Image: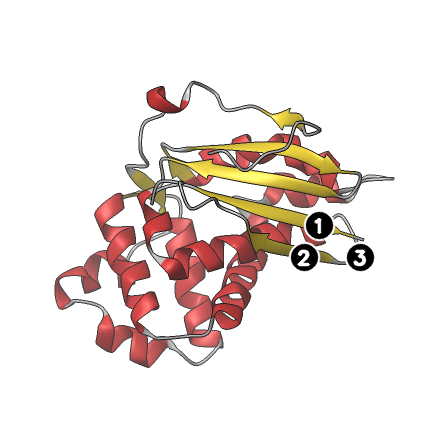
Amino acid sequence: MSVGRATEVEVLAYPAPRRDIASVTRVRSTWVLASLQALRERGHYDRYLALLPPQYHAEILFTVAGLWLPIDISVAHYTACQALGLSEDEQQRMGMNVGNRAQGTILATAVKMAKGAGVTPWTILPQFDRLWRRGLDGGAVAVFKTGPKEARIEVVACTLLEIPYWRAAFGGVLLDIASLFCQKAYIRAVTSRAAAKDECALRLQWA
């Protein structure tokens, strides 16, 4: 993914060369459960249920926290979310809601770190690989410092990125995490046109 600059500093490196990083095969059910709750809270659940193929109802609606779900289950869930036709802003807000609900489980480490004195987003950014692996099996994340209060976050080998809803919601989750460490945070996609469908880059800025 060639969207960087020569002045960037690598904060979190990929765990292996891109060609050796396996695609995501499983996702923690905790993410899907938090997403379902967000759909309920924001009034989208009934339409979502109508859009979710019946063969996935039992596996998604009656799952419990902490399980690994096969990637096809998550794809079905987020494809139904995409079919809701929500604006990108609403999709991102859904992601922020999901991130907030995950603070007691997958993101508990981030919450604990945010309570320390003098913390900034640079406190948590080097830990993003750890947070990623708690929620997804496969894929990888890397972080590059592009300014005093600006970072580029890259994700590769994640087929969920092919679903626009998941891309926007994932940005919302990152925004929610960063907001624990600063007064205000902003995020936007900066993926180059040459990037594969299963990878993306996001620019995170804060004040």
Q: CA distance from mark 3 to mark 2?
A: 11 Å
Classify mark 2: residues with Cα within 10 Å, few (<14), some (14-19) or many (20+).
some
Q: Residues within 10 Å of mark 3 (few under 14, many from 20)?
A: few
Residue 143, position in %: x, y? 60, 33
Give the distance between the C-alpha atoms of the residues marked 1 and 2, in whole angstroms. 5 Å
Give the colour scheme shown.
secondary structure
- Whether pointer 1 and pointer 3 mark residues with C-beta atoms closer than 8 Å, the reply is no
Residue type at the position of mark 2: Tyr
Q: Nearer the viewer, residue 149 or 126?
A: 149
Dots 1, 2 in contact, CB < 8 A: yes
Please state the horizontal and vertical placement of residue 64, each as a whole percent of the image.
34, 53
Can you tell which mark lies on residue 183?
Answer: 3
Q: Amino acid at mark 1?
A: Gln
Residue 44's disc is: none
Q: Residues within 10 Å of mark 1 (few under 14, many from 20)?
A: many
The span from disc 1 to disc 3 (Cα, nearest Å) is 11 Å
Residue 196 in view (yes/no) = yes
The disc, 1 or 3, on the residue closer to the chain's N-terminal end is: 3
Q: Nearer the viewer, residue 121 or 112?
A: 121
Q: Which mark is residue 186?
A: 2
State the residue position of label 1.
Answer: 205
> The disc labelled 3 sits on which kind of residue?
Gln
Give yes or no for contact between labels 3 and 2 (Cβ–Cβ under 8 Å): no
Q: SS class of the residue under badge 2?
A: strand
Q: Quadrant of residue 164?
A: bottom left
Percent from the top left, x then y, of residue 199? 40, 41
Please give the name of the residue rendered at 65% of the width and 48% of the height, measured from the top-left corner: 204
Q: Nearest to the eye among marks 1 and 3: give it.
A: 1
